Amino acid sequence: MSVDGEDAATDPIHSSLSQLEESDFERFDPPADVWERIEASIAGDPVTSPKEPPSRMIPASTIVEYWIDANDNVADVGQSWADFARDNDAPELVVPASDRALWTYFESDEIRDLWRLLVERVRALQTGVEVPLRCDAPDARRWFDMTITPERNGGVHFRCVLVFEETRPTVSLLDIQSERDNGVRPVPLCSWCARGQHGPRWLEVEALVRVTRLLERAVMPPISHGICTSCRDQMSAELLVPGAVGESTVDPSNP
């Protein structure tokens, strides 16, 4: 049912539209993922599992490797290690100290203990495990598959392969060059799924930035790296169940 006042207001628009011809229009195709974006905005903030990267896979273009000895010191690194450290603003890691234990690089006791359990399992069972994880850059989401395998004399080999990368607008919270306000509480980020903690919830970092209104700040809060409750529970359960972490049999006599 129409209202006379509304009809009068829209008459000039209808008149103008009736004079347009097909040649007056130009076709613009929407982005291929527009429906995915719309669906995600309706569904709310998605929770992406570190074990389920998006289906649009890319050829592995980045492989980062390193080895620890029986004393857990970083004994060697692969050819891409230095480049990856530089690209991720970590010049102090370009040449890691040979007498520094791997565990000293972790700031969270909880995540340090989980990695130690993984390494102890690999050594004790002489069986490799595969661990999927997120390792985002400020301007990209990145999913890696890490393989941890036993070597001779108690050594352990870590091999990280990039399986998916998706660009996004730069997130200043993740930019190591951003100025930090060390007088405020750090924002906890999960080292497995890359989500950030906001109260009792763990959110994708873009959602975290939005709800905490970080874009309105000139100075970013510091960040701390740990593990979210769902990843912790999942990893703890899998460490107790043989074969549940994606094991691959490795012959330590033929590394």
Image: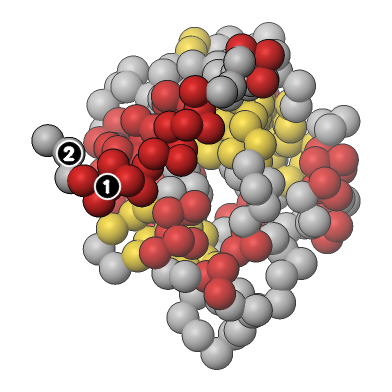
- The residue carrying mark 2 is 2
Q: Is residue 147 left or right of residue 37?
A: right
Residue flagged by tag 1: what amino acid is it?
A: Glu
The percent position of residue 22, horizontal first and vertical second, equals 61, 12
The percent position of residue 130, horizontal first and vertical second, equals 49, 23
- Residue 106 versus residue 89: which sits nearer the camera? 89
The residue lying furthest to the bottom in this view is 183
Q: Secondary structure at mark 2?
A: loop
Q: Is residue 9 above or below residue 63?
A: below
Residue 166 placement: quadrant: top right
* Label 2, label 1: how far apart the Cα atoms are: 7 Å
Q: Residues within 10 Å of mark 2 (few under 14, many from 20)?
A: few
Q: Is residue 25 above or below residue 71?
A: above
Quadrant of image for the N terminus: top left
Residue flagged by tag 2: what amino acid is it?
A: Ser
Task: Name which residue lies at 37% across and 42% down.
Answer: 10
How are the colours assigned in the image? secondary structure
The percent position of residue 117, horizontal first and vertical second, equals 42, 42
Q: Work out whether residue 66 can be spotted.
A: yes
The percent position of residue 239, horizontal first and vertical second, equals 33, 34
- The residue carrying mark 1 is 6
